[in-house]
Image: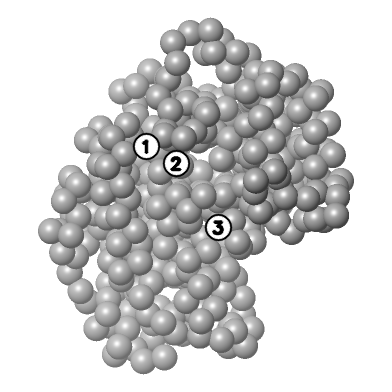
């Protein structure tokens, strides 16, 4: 890989005229706010998604979505507070049980692997609220289309926690150089298209607390999976990276091929300040996620809460539905976060394609049907179990 080519690529300046819906461009990163965008105007949302897609593919590779959970919205703030409290309980429980934490900087960091499932088990109410965020669906479908699979991991960096080494991420970013070299060039390009990275701030993240460091435009460097471990590329990263402070409830999304690293928490031990983030790793339907989610167990944990809320809303005024969809926007977002939307691989002898379709019913289809048909927990869990056994 040519360092000179890499330097030229990463020395570009973001053209703000390409992203008219962004509030501002800071350090080459477009910053959006949910307060100035619309989920209900399909044309306007499509225009914003086109901007996001360009950012992730051909632009700087990163964008911030402020007020992803809006602190000025009572429901959002209550959701964030309850979710952060659930994460704190999970970390305390795992620490007391001797569960291994982070894969770097042991002692300075706390990590919850598969925070998605553990959140559901610990606090179904805040789980349902947290993953019913329609903005999560809007961002995920921008890069991955329908049927995406959500996984999440919490990372907490305590005072004095050092920075990560710069890297690319899952898929090929988790492979050794010699393994990466065995994959053809086309799969190097495809790897970046199979995952979307995100992080939701569960605390304010001032600059000195070490928010994620990014090298804009680095996702466009074709041999990047073979380059990021090399000392000269890491040295260039250290000279040129950018990092943006975030407020609690903000989110940042980026192409997994962007060279990036968690920053150092330079706030003193006396401050007691912990940088808290829920890291979202969202996989395309046609790819494989890093973690496995036991959807049946999660549904069993949260279905009574889901059923209670859905039935209560069904007796009230109907919410906003997308064209051609049976559920209100927040319920559709939740279903897509909860279950698999892609029904393959499967046994087509036991699960033939649905009538008038080419594919059998997916987990999302089944969950959606369970909501609309009034299934209780036992029936919903039994139907999912049967789907998995088939």
Q: Distance between the residues labelled 3 and 1?
A: 21 Å
Task: Give the residue number, with chain letter if any, for mark 3.
Answer: 284
- In terms of sequence position, does the residue under pointer 2 or pointer 1 come before the other? 1
Please say if the residues under marks 2 and 1 sit with CB atoms less than 8 Å apart: yes
Q: In which quarter of the image is residue 166?
A: bottom left
Q: What element carries label 2?
A: helix
Q: What element carries label 1?
A: loop
Decide: is 292 above or below 215. above
Say left or right for 350 vs 116.
right
Please say if the residues under marks 2 and 3 sit with CB atoms less than 8 Å apart: no
- In terms of sequence position, does the residue under pointer 2 or pointer 3 come before the other? 2
Decide: is 267 above or below 106. above
Q: Is mark 3 on a helix, strand or loop?
A: loop
Task: Give the residue number, with chain letter if any, for mark 1.
Answer: 68
Please tell me how crowded label 1 is: few (under 14), some (14-19), or many (20+) other residues with Cα within 10 Å: many
Q: Position of residue 217 (x, y in %)?
A: 30, 71
**Which of the two residues, 240 or 76, is positioned nearer the viewer here?**
76
Seen at 40% across and 68% down, the residue is 258
Q: Which residue lies furthest to the front in this view?
A: 356
Q: How far apart are marks 2 and 3 (CA)?
A: 14 Å
Say left or right for 8 vs 138.
left
Seen at 40% across and 78% down, the residue is 234
Give the foreground label among 3 and 1: 3
Q: Position of residue 306 (x, y in %)?
A: 63, 22
**Can residue 111 be seen in the rendering of this structure?**
no
> Could you say which disc has been placed on residue 50 in the image?
none
> Could you say which disc has been placed on residue 136 in the image?
2
Q: In which quarter of the image is residue 354?
A: top right
Q: In which quarter of the image is residue 366?
A: top right
């Amino acid at each position: 890989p040519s360092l000179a080519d890499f330097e030229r690529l990463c020395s570009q300046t973001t053209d703000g005229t390409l992203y008219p819906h962004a509030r501002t461009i800071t350090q080459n990163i477009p910053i959006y706010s949910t307060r100035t965008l619309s989920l209900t105007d399909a044309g306007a949302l499509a225009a914003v998604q086109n901007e996001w897609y360009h950012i992730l593919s051909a632009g700087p590779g990163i964008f911030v979505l402020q007020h992803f959970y809006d602190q000025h919205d009572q429901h959002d703030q209550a959701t964030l507070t309850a979710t952060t409290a659930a994460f704190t309980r999970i970390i305390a429980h795992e620490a007391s049980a001797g569960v291994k934490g982070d894969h770097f900087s042991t002692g300075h960091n706390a990590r919850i692997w598969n925070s998605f499932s553990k959140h559901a088990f610990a606090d179904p109410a805040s789980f349902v609220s947290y993953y019913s965020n329609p903005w999560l669906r809007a961002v995920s479908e921008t890069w991955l289309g329908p049927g995406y699979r959500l996984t999440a991991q919490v990372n907490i960096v305590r005072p004095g926690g050092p920075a990560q080494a710069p890297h690319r991420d899952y898929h090929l970013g988790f492979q050794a150089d010699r393994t990466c070299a065995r994959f053809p060039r086309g799969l190097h390009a495809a790897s970046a298209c199979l995952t979307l990275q995100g992080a939701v701030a569960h605390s304010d993240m001032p600059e000195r607390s070490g928010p994620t460091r990014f090298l804009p435009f680095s996702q466009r460097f074709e041999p990047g999976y073979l380059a990021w471990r090399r000392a000269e590329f890491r040295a260039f990263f250290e000279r040129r990276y950018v990092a943006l402070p975030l407020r609690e409830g903000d989110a940042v999304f980026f192409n997994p091929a962007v060279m990036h690293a968690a920053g150092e928490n330079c706030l003193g031990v006396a401050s007691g300040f912990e940088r808290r983030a829920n890291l979202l790793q969202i996989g395309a339907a046609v790819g494989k996620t890093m973690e496995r989610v036991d959807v049946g167990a999660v549904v069993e944990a949260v279905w009574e809460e889901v059923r209670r809320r859905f039935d209560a809303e069904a007796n009230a005024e109907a919410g906003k539905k997308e064209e051609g969809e049976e559920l209100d926007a927040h319920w559709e977002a939740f279903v897509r976060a909860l279950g698999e939307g892609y029904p393959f691989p499967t046994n087509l002898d036991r699960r033939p394609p649905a009538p008038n379709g080419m594919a059998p019913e997916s987990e999302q289809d089944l969950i959606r049907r369970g909501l609309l048909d009034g299934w209780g927990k036992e029936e919903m869990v039994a139907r999912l179990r049967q789907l998995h056994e088939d």
